[in-house]
Amino acid sequence: MSRRGTRAARPQLTQRGANTVHQEEEKVVGHHEHLGAAPRQWLRRGRFGAIALTAAAALAIAGCGSSKSNSGGSSSGGSASTSATNASSSGSSGGSSSAVSAALAKFEAPTSKYGLPSAALKHAGNLKGKTIFYIPVASVVPEFAITAAQLKTAAAAVGAKVDVCSDPTGTPTEWNACVGQAISQKVAAIVLDAAPWQVVANQLTAATKKGIKVVTADQPADPALPKADSADILGVSGTMQTAVADWVISDSKGKGSALILMDTDGPAPPIYITHFALPEFKKHAPGFKYTIQKISTANQGQVASAVSSQLLKNPSTGYVYTEFDQFLPNAQQGVQSANATSKVKGVSTTALLAGLQLLKSKSYSYADAGQDYPFSAWAFADEAYRLILGQPAVPENIPMRLFTRQNVSGLQLTNAAQNSGSWYGATTFPTQFKKLWGVG
């Protein structure tokens, strides 16, 4: 899940990879986050939260949603779906197949060179004995366990340590308790990973007043926090959606139709679909049709039946596009219930072990995009160290990769490989970061 512009006078920690879409990701997501950030009494919901979204974000959550045409049709209450047909020139492939092919070649390739910050960390010896408090949106989610383990290794390299807040269900009450615990322990820095800062804003302000630095990961930072005390590192969730959309466009030759399962657990996931995936279809496959099905963690048990219903309603659907692997088993069950396994191709993002094992089995999944979670942890540590030592924030370039049935075949699909980041390329980044910090 790697999961979330205007922020005047804030360090721009844009993910500047080979594709400029990384830069657009921060601008687009940051802008939408900013729209709803001012009134702190308006609380929004993260991927695993259970609180209301701000109306200012202009993103409606429907427990099991409404139906709406993107050509201006009417809406009606109903089960969990929102239909949107991209039919601006039905039957035309549109766009540039060469541009899509070139993009896919980059997305599918392993990282050949890590883009670490150019500025070296100074006085790393002063980090000895410091504590970083890691607060994930939900510690039971595998990617956050990977991040926590790597963060501990990165901290040990400079003589620091990491405490992880254990929140098995991921709720606003628990996130606030975690920040409160960090304040009481007088830690040096907090890393808030994907848990929406809006629900802990007052606590974060209190933390910075106590001299605690704050790194918000996979989302823009709270604009109210002093820039000297906070920094943000966006992941590449939007870029991952672009990559999956490009794969569908290429595979379908710009024609056909898809059922898109859009996660509504917070303001960011819908933005990843509407501002990264859908524009790709509009640009490169204007004749491609899609139906958007809103889904959420709270209604995860209904996803399979919703998928089956949509496929029976639209039997020509050739792709089921699941925004995150969390819902992949439900999507596959729905496809099986509709007896559509032989004609529907599944695609998704997150690319954790179970998702890639499904991809390699060639039973349902065809493409899955992921973020280099082990590398992300070292980048989080790097940013926290700079804040603690009073040094300027720097851009952190998080790698991502699109996995397909072709390139997954050569990967070791083990927990050890997942935890090392070897699926994304050479695992030399720990050595490189240590050198950057002057401890290796």
Image (cartoon, rainbow, N blue to C red):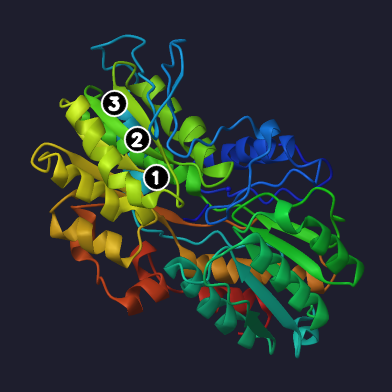
Q: Are marks 2 and 1 in contact (CB under 8 Å)?
A: yes
Q: Amino acid at mark 2?
A: Ile
Instruction: Identify which residue, 59 or 146, lies in the foreground.
Output: 59
In the picture, measured across the screen, residue 217 lies left or right of residue 68, that is right
* Number of marks in the rendered image: 3
Kind of residue indicated by mark 3: Ser
**Residue position for label 1:** 323
Q: Amino acid at mark 1?
A: Glu
Q: Is residue 250 above or below residue 243?
A: above
Question: Which residue: 62% across, 49% down?
Answer: 51
Say if mark 3 contacts mark 2, CB within 8 Å: no
Which residue is at the front of the view, 158 or 291?
291
| Location of residue 438 with respect to 374 vertically, above or below | below
Q: Which dot marks residue 260? A: 2
Image location (x, y in percent) of residue 383: 70, 66
Residue 83 at least partly seen: yes
Precedes in sequence: disc 2 or disc 1? 2
| Alpha carbons under labels 3 and 2: distance apart | 22 Å
| Residue 403 visible to an observer of this rendering | no
Looking at the picture, how far across and down is residue 82, in whole percent? 41, 27
* Label 1 Cα neighbours within 10 Å, binned few <14 / some 14-19 / many ≥20: many
Q: Is 296 left, or right, of 333 in this rendering?
A: right
Q: Quadrant of residue 173?
A: bottom right
Q: Could you tell me residue 266's position as x and y percent?
A: 57, 45
Q: What residue is rendered at 85% in x and 50% in y?
A: 224
Residue that mark 3 sits on: 97
| Distance of label 1 from label 3 (alpha carbons) | 23 Å
Q: Which is closer to the viewer, label 3 or label 2? A: 2
**Circle 2 — which element?**
strand
**Rendered position, 69 above or below 189:** above
Q: CA distance from mark 2 to mark 1?
A: 7 Å
- Relative side of 258 to 73, left or right: left
